């Protein structure tokens, strides 16, 4: 069987993507944070120019759904007034920086993420990043805690805190990196991105660092410090040092819920379909929020599916909800409506990917792999959910 076709791109605000319910307008919030007033304004814009539905993406971005083409220009003008629009689409695409949400004021992580984002967006004006013709999915992760929490999140260049206030900068998939002072971390990350380009990491506009490291078999000379092992991080709703984590069912918020959350104060986005409410100690009781650690919905990663996505081959959310109680504890079921796997780009414990005739099932794999597996009919999955637990 031939490999499934993968189409589309990562949308932005300046370059939205057409979907089944209108344009998808993605907001890359600086440092993944919005103030209460910004959150209220975004909720209002989602109602005025979209269908009032807002997604929290796997890259810790917000996506306004259902925006009509004639509403896009006034939406951009309103976002510009909030300081949430880049100078151009190229700058927006490069500024793909994920910050671990548990940073504390003055610990250097937030400042580093903002400096890296500014360098990528403004290019030569700050750090000579304007020449970086990186693929749209190419991203950076800034992990400032004592232990990294973002290794399960999609990123190509990782910056993790090292001893003595320094930072380890390394290529995703590599066992060695470069340890630098905080003031040098942005330049080191950009240099590693240039190495990726110079050594042939991009083919036909696509390319990811881990795959390139495997093909290349070599690393820059500066990469001479071992990347330490770290335990897998499994976030759950509840109090954390900076506030309280709340899950978002399917990563989907209504504008009304976002506006209500804004009353609690600043909100940090995460790549786990969760929000961190700064300074709060208790999750509010709002529809669509996941506040219990044993909620079966925490075991799911699910895309919008049909009819909202034009590339979707099937409806997936009702299926995922029905199967959630049958997912083994501690595992994640990724249900994808096509081979792209937008909801969970990395391999998942269990993957169902829509394909002609049903859903391909794979384990420890990506949606692309599952989409090439023999199809299982939806009815069979619903009547025999034990298939998820079979080896």
Image (tube, rainbow, N blue to C red):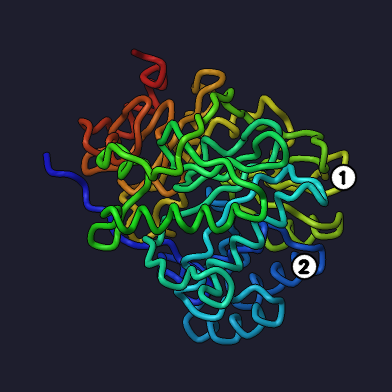
Q: Is any atom of residue 314 visible in this view?
A: no
Residue matched to label 2: 40
Q: Toward the viewer: 317 or 132?
A: 132
Q: Toward the viewer: 350 or 321?
A: 350
The image quarter containing residue 325 is top right
Outermost residue toward the left? 1
> Any mark on residue 280, and which?
1
- Locate residue 239 relative to residue 255 in the image: left or right: right
Q: Where is 109 relative to 71, above or below?
A: above
Residue drawn at 69 percent across, 76 percent down: 83
Outermost residue toward the front? 221
Task: Determine the secondary structure under disc 2.
Answer: helix
Residue 308, percent from left and from top = 44, 59
- Locate residue 63 relative to residue 364 in the image: left or right: right
Numbered disc in front, either 2 or 1: 1
Q: Is any atom of residue 214 visible in this view?
A: yes
| Quadrant of the image containing the C terminus | top left
Q: CA distance from mark 2 to mark 1?
A: 17 Å
Residue drawn at 42 percent across, 56 percent down: 193
Q: Toward the viewer: 259 or 278?
A: 278
């Amino acid at each position: 069987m031939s490999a499934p076709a993968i189409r589309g791109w990562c949308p932005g605000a300046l370059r939205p993507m057409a979907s089944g319910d209108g344009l998808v307008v993605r907001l890359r919030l600086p440092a993944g944070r919005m103030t209460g007033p910004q959150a209220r304004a975004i909720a209002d814009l989602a109602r005025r120019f979209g269908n009032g539905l807002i997604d929290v993406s796997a890259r810790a971005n917000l996506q306004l759904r259902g925006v009509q083409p004639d509403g896009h220009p006034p939406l951009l003008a309103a976002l510009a007034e909030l300081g949430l629009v880049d100078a151009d689409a190229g700058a927006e695409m490069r500024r793909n920086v994920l910050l671990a949400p548990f940073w504390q004021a003055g610990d250097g992580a937030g400042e580093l993420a903002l400096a890296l984002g500014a360098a990528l967006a403004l290019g030569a004006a700050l750090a000579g990043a304007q020449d970086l013709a990186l693929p749209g999915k190419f991203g950076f992760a800034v992990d400032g805690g004592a232990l990294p929490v973002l290794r399960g999140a999609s990123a190509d260049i990782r910056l993790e805190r090292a001893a003595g206030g320094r930072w380890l900068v390394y290529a995703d998939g590599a066992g060695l990196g470069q340890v630098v002072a905080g003031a040098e971390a942005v330049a080191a990350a950009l240099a590693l991105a240039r190495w990726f380009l110079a050594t042939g990491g991009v083919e036909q506009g696509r390319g990811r660092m881990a795959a390139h490291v495997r093909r290349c078999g070599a690393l820059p000379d500066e990469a001479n410090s071992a990347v330490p092992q770290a335990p897998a991080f499994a976030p759950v709703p509840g109090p954390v040092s900076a506030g309280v984590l709340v899950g978002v069912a399917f990563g989907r918020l209504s504008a009304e819920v976002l506006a209500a959350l804004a009353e609690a104060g600043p909100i940090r986005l995460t790549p786990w379909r969760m929000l961190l409410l700064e300074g709060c100690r208790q999750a509010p009781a709002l529809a669509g929020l996941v506040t219990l650690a044993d909620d079966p919905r925490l075991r799911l990663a699910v895309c919008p599916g049909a009819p909202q996505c034009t590339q979707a081959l099937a409806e997936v959310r009702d299926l995922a909800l029905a199967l959630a109680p049958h997912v083994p504890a501690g595992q994640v079921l990724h249900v994808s409506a096509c081979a792209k796997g937008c909801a969970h780009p990395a391999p998942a414990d269990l993957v169902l990917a829509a394909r002609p005739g049903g859903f391909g099932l794979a384990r420890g794999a990506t949606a692309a792999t599952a989409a090439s597996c023999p199809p299982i009919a939806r009815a069979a999955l619903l009547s025999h959910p034990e298939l998820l637990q079979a080896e």
